[in-house]
Every structure is written in C-alpha cells, then in structure tokens.
Amino acid sequence: MKNYILKTLLILPVFFLGTLMAQEDAIPKYKKLMDKPEDVSFAEIQQEAEAYFADKDKGRGSGYKQWKRWEYLHERRLTPDGKVTNVAARNLEAYQQYIQDYGPVQNPGGDDPETTNGYWDFLAPTGYTSGNGWNPGIGRVNCIAFHPTIANYILIGMPSGGLWKTTNGGSTWECLTDGMPSIGVSGIAWPLTNTIYILTGDGDGGDTQSIGVMKTTDGGETWNQTGLQWDVTDFEKGYKLALHPTNNNILFAVTTDGIYKTTNGASSWYQVQSGSFRDLEFKPYDPTVMYAVTTGTFYRSTNTGESWSVVSSGIPTGTSRMAIGVTPDNSSYVYLLAGPSTGAGSFKGVYRSFDSGLNFYLKSDTPNILGYSDVGGDNDNQASYDLAIAVSRTDVADVMTGGINCWTSADFAATWTISSMWSVPNSIGYTHADIHALEINPLNNYLYCGSDGGIFRSTNFGATWTDLSSGIANTQWYRIAGTEASSSLIIGGTQDNGSNKWTGGSTFEHVLGADGMDCMVDHSNSNILYNSTQNGGLNKSTNGGSSYFGIKPSGSSGSWVTPYVMNPVTATTIYGGYSDVYKSTNGGSSWTNTGVDGRGAMALGTSFTGRVYASSGSSIWRSDDAAGTWNSISTGLPGLTITFIAVDPSNSLNVFVTVGGYSSGQKVYESTNGGASGSWTNISGSLPNIPVNCIAYEEGSADGVYIGTDIGVFYRDDNTGDWIPFMNGLPTVPVFDLEINETYGVIRAGTYGRGLWSSALYTPCPTAYFLSPANDPSNPNFTGFQLYEASNTVESSRVITGGYGTNVTYQAGSSVTLQQGFHAQQGNLFKAHLGPCSGTKSPVDIVETEDNPLPIAGPGSQ
C-alpha cells in the first residue's frame, strides 16, 4: 500500500494527450506489464513477451536478454496465485516476522557471535585479473553520490548489494546496509556526513522493486523507512533521488509512479506529478526551475516542482528513454540524450536547449553513440537499460554520454569521440559495458562512471579512466562449482561479468565473457572446466580456462540459467538440462537427446550414477537407466517452481527438492524412494516464507542439508528436527548456489549481490567434550583439520601429531582445560577459543607453532 499524500495533479491540455499516448506506445506491452504487473498473472506476461519476440531478432539491444533475466528471477518468486510481487517488500516482511518468532538469525559481518551457527568469511572477489574473457568486472553500480564538503567521501548504490562507502577516494570500501535484507539502491542523497537517504529498488534492471525511501542519521549503523513506503502490493521502481541544492529538507524521488516531494526531511511525501519518470535535474543557480523526463516526455517546473508542464518544442517522438544534462558553466543550457523505441533503431539523438528547457534543437543523431561499435557504425542500443549524460561543470561545450560505451564531445554534442569500450583488450579505455551513472564531483570536477562492472573515475573528462572497484564485494553469482581435490579452486558464473575462476586470495580470473551461468569442474582433471552463458551456451576448456571452445548441443534450447551435471564417477559423462535433456559420454564432443524438459534443475546419484533427476517448472522426472527412459515423479509436490534438486550420495533414492515463491510452509520436500507414488514429505518446518534457491547435501551426515534462501542459509538434519539459521557473519543476501567440499569440511555460498563466501560445516554442539586417547582408541592423536566445540567446557589430554597442515581448534563457552598428557608437537597449529559454538574467537588465542611450542600442561592447567 502506498504511503504518501496526493497534493497536486497536473491537468494537461487535450492536444497534449495524443502526443503522450503516442510516446507511451513506443514501449512494448510486455515491458509495461513488467513495470505494472498487478492486474495480470506471470503467465500472461510471459505470453506477451513470447508473442513480441516471436518474429524479432533476439540479439544485442533487442531487450531479450533483459526480459529473460527478469523472467528467471520472478518465476521463482511468485505469489500463491501465480502473480509477480514486490520481492524486496516480501523478503523484508518475512525476515522481520521470523526474527519476531524465533529471535536473531545472524550477526552479519561482526566480530561478536550471536545465537546462530555458521562461520562465514568472505572469499572473493574484491578484484579481478583479465584472462580469456572479454568483459571483466566486479558488479553493477546503479548510482553515485558525493559528500557535500569532503571530495574523497563517495557513496555508490547496487542492484542487490546495498549501499557502499569510501572515505579515501575509492582505495577501500565498506557496505553500510548488511544488517537488513538485500535491497537495490537506485538513488542517493547525502546532505550531511551521517545523514543519508536511499531510494530503494533496482530501476534499470528490475531485479527488485522499491520499498520506498530509507534514511540513516548515524552514518549507516541503523536505517529507518521514511514517509514514502511501498509494500508487497506495490510495483514501483526508483530511478533517482534529488536533493535540493540549498535546502536539505527538500528532496525529490523519481519513480515509475511519478515524482514525489518532501519538504521535511522525508517524514512525509506528496506526489507532484504522475507518470513513469526516469530523470530529473535542477537548473543551476535557480532551483525553482526543474526538468524531468519520462520515457518519452519532457516536463518543466518553475515553482520547485509543485506543478509541471509538458514541453514539446523540438522533443523527439518514439523514444524508449531520455536523460538530462545541465551545467553551472551556462545555466540556460539543457542537453537531452534520447534512445529509440525498443527494437526500432540505434540512436534518436542529442538535443540542446538554449532557453532553460523551453525549446530544443537536434545537435546530432550520428554516429550511433549507444551501440557496441567503437566507430558508432552498428544499429544496436540498450537505452531502456543503460543511458546517462554529464556536462562539464567548467565548459558547457564538453559533453559525456553513456550507453553501452562512453562517448565525449567537445563541440556542444555536434561530433563525438569514443571514450571507453565495453570489452577488452582495446586501445581506447575500459569502463565495462552498460553505463548507468555519469556523475561529476563538484568539489574536484572528477567524472565518475557507474557500469555493469563497477565504478570508474576520470580526472580529465574521459581521456583516461581508472577502475576503483577493488574492495567492493557486490558480485551477483548464479552458480559455483569446485572439486574435492582442492579447497582453493572455485569457478562460477556471474550476472554481467561472465565466468570467473578463484584459486585463493581475494581476486578472481575472468575466464569467459557474457553473463556467466552454471559450471562444472572435471573431478578427474581440474584443468578441464565447463562454463556456460545465458540461455544455454556451453563452453569447455582443457587448459584451466586459458581458452574455450563451444560444445552446446545442436538444436538445443536452454533457459536463462541452464543446469548441467557431471557423472560423479565417470567425468566424461555429462548432462545438459535443455528443453530436452541432452547426454554426452565423451565430454561434450557429441550429444544424445534423451527427452523430457530439464531446464529447471538436474541432479545425479553417486551410489548409483544411472539415477538422474530433471525438472522444469513444477514438473520433475526420474530416470533409472542413465536417461534412457523417464518417469514423472511430480505427484505429491505442491505444483510450484522447482529451484534445485539434491541427492544423498550414499542413497540415490533419498532426494530433496526446493521450491520458490511465497507459498507459506511449502519450501523443501524429501522422498526416501525417489519420489515414487507421490512419496514426498514436506520438511519446510519453521522456515520463513521466502523463496528457497538451492540445496546441498552433506555426505556422511544424518540427512544434513543446507539451503540457500533470499535472506541467507539454513541447516537441518535428523537430529535438529527443524531448520536452524546457518548464517553467522553472512550478509542478509540471496544465496543462489551452495557447494560443499567434504574433504576440507567447508561450504561455499555464491550470493546474488555480495560475492563468494565460505564457512566450516555444521557441527553439533555438546555441552562438554572430554578428549583423551582412551575415549577414542581409533583416533588417539590428531591430524589434519579438526574443530571441537562445546557450549560449556572442553578438556583434553590428546597429542597433536599431524605435522604441517594440521590445524586443531578447541572452542568452549566457559573454559578450555589442557590436562596432563596434552601436547602439540612442532609443526602443528593449535588454537583455543572461548565463545559460543560456531561463534567467533575470543580476544585471547593459545597458539603453538614450530617456533613457539606450548609447554606440557599439568593437571588442571588452563
């Protein structure tokens, strides 16, 4: 429900209405329904999109990629009646209800343990190296804001990674929003050091809708909703938050539900203009004059936004989006960058007004500065997704634009020179593809660019660029994969930033471009990697990612994230979950179509590798003859979108599935006989009403399973009986994939917006541990990695003998007692901590190394 006061409405003359309707008709119906889905089902939106793209090119600039991403994310987050919902509002509501019912779930990023399990540490990336791929980056940056008086203080907003801050010009960064569920940030206003406003939601990508404007008065330690709030039934998106130049209590929110204004520091808001807006600017030196644009209409106000009039003189028609540029060098100049209607051309032009936005004149419509080509010779654009403009504060003739690339003009937008390219290597400059923000810091005139790959700075208006993204952890991972043989090899696919390889440290290597999706590591040869791209493009490397070749099955059709699985015994046998499941027995050199739709999820048995599971939508099948024949096993499941499948490695009939959406109490199901005869048991228990994205089974456990949800990780086994939060130290962020390394006792989480994380596996916590050789004759001495936790005491007389590579930790709530006989031999690492189970360490460690051996403890020594 909207929370605002409706103060004024603009009554338009009749002769303007036809123009406005024609402008809106430039937007395809499916896109209108994506923005305003409240009156239709998700299936109806799908039908409209499929009909629109049926006879159109689906390549670059068509909008097809953005549609498929939106479809994938929302199909797994529907209401019980099959409708799209405000995901951010739903997740916030469920998160708050769960805390109310069960208490705190985590201590995100903190040093003091709370009541939950998990030992999460951030792995990567905070930087990258450019390998075989062509579009390296960290993650998308939607918006940029500057401190009013300190040039090196900068804020940036992400689509799902929250708000980030630097106090040293971009050398280091910190997240200010980890304490609340993942939100998009599309607008920032920063009037005072500790007072920050954010307009929530993901305007450009639509990953999340807005929940309104939030405010902090303590520098981000706590956040509160303001008078502008949207809930689960609202579908607004935010695009910009504008702060009045001389009055910190006046702000404007630019949204798909109109322009909203506050005059009391966001305590209350009122709508000053209806419509689906994209940009807004104040006239320099005279903030009573304002400019704003929808996708195709230019508006002007002369009373600080209280009322608005439509300007039509010189404004182009048939646009999908426009952006406004102004400068204090000449306050009467207004530039207008216009993109064409979706799928209908490359570039509408740059227009200029000399009279404060009353009349506009075309300055240029060639070359195509919105496409991929470095000479502007193509016919591509993604203007509805990426469009930005900035005008030099010191020279009104200097203009910078952002689309897929950055272009600059030094002659009032008459001619253009490319400033940065979307791909590498190039000899021009790199800011990644898809420019969402171009902002000039008024304190030093530095130009900043926010793109799909991160944040970049130019100190010379685009002549050169510096990547400032190192230290930001906002990568959106779809899938990750590792190998039991190594604890420091992870590959994965990311939104906007391709496929990447982590081998330790805080950086990854960019090995394949496009949008990265599912992936596999050959368990018999870790140099053989399989990485995929959107809609089922499958590629293989035999040299650790140095080069790739395509192996997608001919004639196959995949989903946005097409699933792949590898036989756990014979690595050359792989399966692809296309509209028909394909099987290869030679590592992808040739394929056999086995039938049934596997575009949702796939899994294989380990104890019996001939048992294969595949799903699509709410349907699931099982094969008992290595995909020779299939049987439906959907009966007994709730008819909701299946998001993941996990199989017990020791019993291939013991299978688990997770489902998406917001149907309360319908999240995770288990069958002990392969789903036969409707034998599914609902084990959702006390889980909050949020989508479950993935599941991983811990081998050798009492049916221990971990699930990744939209707010973090939960754990369950036969002993816990119900789900417990497993997210201590983990940000409240969607987890899209989980990967367990049994050999090293760790679990990795690929988050959608906060990078790659790692934790020790769940360990039951007894009251006390008595560790003596007599208590465990089969293991009288310690070798390898060992963690012993107890809620009260740990007492030990063990000898640690493993040598280099042995790492033993005791942790107890009240005391650790080293009894007579205890000894850690040289070359071993031993630690003792005081703290709750799966908490973090106390300030004092007891450590023994080769250079610092511990003395043999006497009776009762501590």
Image (cartoon, rainbow, N blue to C red):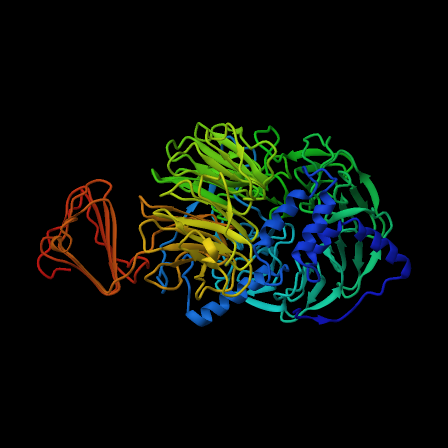
Quadrant where the C terminus sits is bottom left
Q: Nearer the viewer, residue 641 or 510?
A: 641
Residue 559 x %, y %: 59, 43
Q: Nearer the viewer, residue 512 or 199?
A: 512
* Residue furthest out toward the right: 15
Q: Nearer the viewer, residue 699 or 463?
A: 699
Residue 275 x %, y %: 76, 59
Indicate the quadrant where residue 382 lies.
top right
In the rendered view, does 240 fall on the left or right side of 734?
A: right
Quadrant where the N terminus sits is bottom right
Residue 736 x %, y %: 49, 50
Residue 787 x %, y %: 26, 53
- Would residue 73 be visible to someone looking at this image? yes
Badge count: 0
- Location of residue 308 with respect to 623 vertically, above or below: below
- Would residue 475 be visible to someone looking at this image? no
